[in-house]
């Protein structure tokens, strides 16, 4: 019996390094998330597509959101903004805006979200000839497939080992917001660009690393942490390799700039189009009522933290758990990487949580469960801590999946409204005793 077990283990170890196994594993993860999303729709009485043959579209130019933007069960919450931007971009925006009073234009001019994901969708939809929601969803699925496939490649396996690499990916997928990999959101594309940047950096393809990191910075503001992580790693390598000739210095400086090219292009466009390179920050602050987060950081209110625990998604609890896991496992996990790669991971983790925290602290960390998914070193630290603790591993995965299904996914599927509160949070046993 033992030789059979050993043979099976050896076969699994050999297979887990092959392209077909890695691809199959990635597809299995996506299929599982998609199946659970579909099942989640059923508890609300929703089919996967509530309006087959009727793509999202604006009925009137003055409408704030396109009709049927949420017909797909994987298209909820922020997806409405990206679907809208993918359909008409900034075409309804006035030529000039007052950064201090954007409210009059915000209904038809969506400046509170980065437009890059929607722009990619518009391009791949051939200028709107294909249904934009399906195209954006396809981008997410494709990006997630690339991300999951790259994770199990030689770059991480050479540092962490085969089992720990797969374990870290399992922990990411079973995290409470792991379902985001198959939804119409910017997380999948950002994750693929982030990991691609790290792998390129590992292979000393610095221009590619910088281009991918810069692309991420144009997708969402928290991805500035990706640009900063890549730039810091390149800077450390440059300092370690001194003396360098003038041509190499010029290349490295250009690479540092390219780490932020997406944000630079977006800010430049906003400056030309609206006369304000920071109009996204002003619009987001006004839309979500946190105009002065820096000032509020100097005077944090205890109520924010209390609400983060009481809030239906329990973001404060999950943020503390993420910090705890990272503090416990970061040395064991990241200590096996060279200094410049360690710098990338640390800058990514700290930058992601700080940038996200600044924006959502006055909102009691609303949305933090999803933002934490972008802090990839967290899952490396978790795997390092739990790989030899099977009881702890099973306990954590059960807790994560419980919250995934009953809380985060339920809230995402239901969308805003009393029906979501009733299905996801109302104690159904009341009145049955």
Image: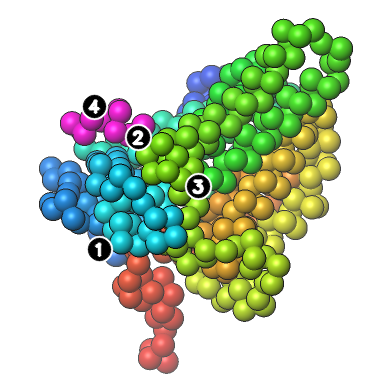
- Above or below for 181 versus 139: below
Q: Name the residue under label 2.
A: 119
Q: Which is more N-terminal, label 4 or label 3?
A: 4
Q: Name the residue under label 3.
A: 278
Give whichever of 87, 409 is nearer the camera. 87
- Quadrant of the snapshot with the N terminus: top right
Q: Residue at x 49, y 43 (%)?
A: 277
Q: Residues within 10 Å of mark 2 (few under 14, many from 20)?
A: many
Residue 113 drawn at (x, y percent) = 42, 49
Residue 292 drawn at (x, y percent) = 57, 64
Q: Name the residue under label 1.
A: 45
Q: Give the range drawn in magenta.
A: 119-130
Kindly report which numbered mark, 3 or 4, lies closer to the viewer in this rendering: 3
Q: Which is more N-terminal, label 2 or label 1?
A: 1
Q: Residue at x 86, y 12 (%)?
A: 243
Q: Which is more N-terminal, label 3 or label 2?
A: 2
- Quadrant of the snapshot with the C terminus: bottom left
Circle 4: element type: loop
Q: How far apart are marks 3 and 1 (CA)?
A: 42 Å
Left/right placement of residue 283 relative to residue 76 reads right
Q: Name the residue under label 4.
A: 126
């Amino acid at each position: 019996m033992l030789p059979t077990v050993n043979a099976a283990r050896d076969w699994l170890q050999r297979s887990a390094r092959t392209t077909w196994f890695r691809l199959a594993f990635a597809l299995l993860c996506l299929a599982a998330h998609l199946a659970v999303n579909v099942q989640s729709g059923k508890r609300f009485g929703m089919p996967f597509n509530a309006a087959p043959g009727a793509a999202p579209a604006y009925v009137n130019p003055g409408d704030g959101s396109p009709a049927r933007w949420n017909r797909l069960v994987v298209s909820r919450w922020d997806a409405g903004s990206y679907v809208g931007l993918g359909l008409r971009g900034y075409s309804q925006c006035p030529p000039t805006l007052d950064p201090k009073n954007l409210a009059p234009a915000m209904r038809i001019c969506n400046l509170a979200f980065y437009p890059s994901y929607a722009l990619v969708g518009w391009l791949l939809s051939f200028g709107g000839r294909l249904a934009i929601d399906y195209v954006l969803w396809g981008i997410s699925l494709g990006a997630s497939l690339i991300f999951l496939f790259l994770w199990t490649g030689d770059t991480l396996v050479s540092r962490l080992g085969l089992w720990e690499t797969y374990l870290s990916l399992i922990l990411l997928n079973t995290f409470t917001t792991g379902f985001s990999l198959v939804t119409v959101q910017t997380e999948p594309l950002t994750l693929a660009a982030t990991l691609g940047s790290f792998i390129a950096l590992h292979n000393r393809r610095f221009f590619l690393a910088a281009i991918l990191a810069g692309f991420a910075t144009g997708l969402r503001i928290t991805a500035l942490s990706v640009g900063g992580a890549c730039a810091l790693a390149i800077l450390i390598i440059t300092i370690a390799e001194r003396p360098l000739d003038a041509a190499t210095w010029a290349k490295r400086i250009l690479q540092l700039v390219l780490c932020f090219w997406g944000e630079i292009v977006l800010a430049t466009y906003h400056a030309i189009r609206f006369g304000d390179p920071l109009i996204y920050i002003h619009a987001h602050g006004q839309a979500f009522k946190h105009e002065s987060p820096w000032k509020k950081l100097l005077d944090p209110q205890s109520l924010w933290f209390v609400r983060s625990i009481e809030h239906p998604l329990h973001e404060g609890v999950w943020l503390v758990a993420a910090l705890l896991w990272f503090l416990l496992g970061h040395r064991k996990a990241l200590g096996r990487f060279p200094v410049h790669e360690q710098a990338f991971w640390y800058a990514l983790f700290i930058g992601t949580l700080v940038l996200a925290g600044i924006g959502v602290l006055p909102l009691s960390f609303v949305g933090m469960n999803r933002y934490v998914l972008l802090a990839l070193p967290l899952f490396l630290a978790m795997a390092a801590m739990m790989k030899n603790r099977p009881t702890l591993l099973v306990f954590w995965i059960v807790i994560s999946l419980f919250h995934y299904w009953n809380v985060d996914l339920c809230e995402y599927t239901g969308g805003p409204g009393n029906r979501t509160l009733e299905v996801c949070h109302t104690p159904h046993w009341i009145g049955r005793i």
